[in-house]
Image: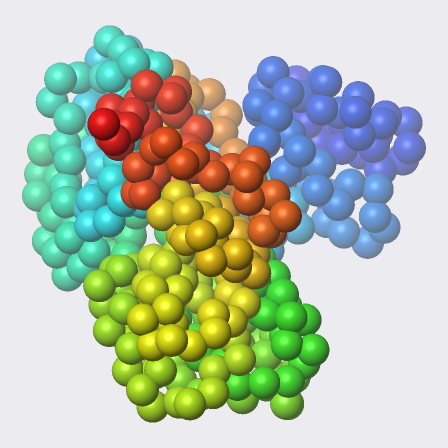
Amino acid sequence: MNENRFINSLLERVDRGQLSRRGFILATGSILGLTGAYSLLGTAGIPGVARTAEAATKSQAGKVRPEEWERMLFYDCTPFKKDPPWKLANLSQGPTNSWALMLDGHTDYAIKEKYKGLFSDKYLYADGQLNAAVQVAAVETLLAQRPDVMISTPLGAALKGPLERVWNAGIPVIQMQMPYLTDRFLCYVNADNAFHGRVTAEWVAKKLNGKGKIVMASGAAGVDTAEVRLAAARAVFAKYPNIEILAHGYHNWSISQGKKGFEAWLAAHPKIDGVWSDSAFQSWPAVEAFVEAGRDIPPMPTEPLNGFLKLAKKYNLEFLSVGYPNVPGLIMVDVAVRAMMGEVVPRYVYVDQLVFEEDELDKYLRPDMSDDLWVDYRYPLQWALKQFPKKG
């Protein structure tokens, strides 16, 4: 019995009440890993939901975002199996800010330490400079060097054709963003940006008791992370007719650009009751701008960036932090290794997100470490200290 058939038979037993969910995890965890097993279990036991991987493949791949799949899909990587060392290509968004630097750092840890000796010394790294056009050109350069496997963080829909060509060339593509629909990829690794946008907007609406004037700050236009969060947040605010959106802007996940944006909004609007921000790169400069303008700091969502957490402590802020871990840089390499070994891999890996409010601030704040540290890192501490040494 092949793995797909075995897994589907266990799902059928769960549906019939003959196997517990815990039993399914124990039976399949060694094959799929815990994340894959939990994801596949999904809606097992709920009548009327398609059960088999085959059925899901026909109805979901390339037609529905992986976050919305009813059933986890898998890929048999036997055709990619190859003896190490393997040549890895990384189409990075580029180390344009501290979060992206740590994303690359998680990849470096995977290559240089966790899987030391399994990858070729010829590591093909492309700095995307947070620019889709730069990435499009970089794909062709990487493809010409014939990597065995590619990890990528595509920054826009323009990458659909280039990355599909990589897949068509027989090279497995593992990606962290999905700014287009396709079935020509091996695995998509990401946290849930729709969840991020939705829960942060709901929190703002609740803090304002459903009425007030707000501004909205996003990252980079056209990038999946920003656009999915924004759409989810707007859908929430649309349910609150007494919440007025005064302004929205894209600040490219740049603290300096965010500062200028908030300074302009504060000058233009004498009353701002709340801030919706898709990132700590917007909430951090928002705090600074409100302080410098002598205005009360309204409640706002953020992410677990140490610099913001220090400001939250200093000014006793009301906030909701929803994490967006940089660990996909590591997980994409995990999947690449499994692919090169010819294993069956999940086509979607959900990355869990750290969520907390100001009452748990002291639990996560690292006052002795760099402002640029994202405290939900998943590589060893010495790697965090390597990228962001302690002061003094």
* Visible residue check, residue 99: yes
Question: For residue 186, what is the image quadrant?
Answer: top left
Outermost residue toward the right?
17
Question: For residue 384, what is the image quadrant?
Answer: top left
* Visible residue check, residue 221: no
Seen at 19% across and 23% down, the residue is 87
In the depicted structure, whether residue 80 falls above or below residue 180: above
Q: x and y percent of residue 369 in the render? A: 34, 33
118 left or right of 125? right
155 left or right of 125? right
Q: x and y percent of residue 213 in the render? A: 53, 85
The total number of labels drawn is 0
Seen at 64% across and 90% down, the residue is 241
Seen at 29% across and 14% down, the residue is 113
Q: x and y percent of residue 117 in the render? A: 24, 9
In the depicted structure, whether residue 13 falls above or below residue 302: above
302 left or right of 250? right
Question: For residue 223, what is the image quadrant?
Answer: bottom left
* Closer to us: 191 or 288: 288
* Closer to us: 152 or 355: 355
Seen at 32% across and 43% down, the residue is 371
For the N terminus, the image quarter is top right
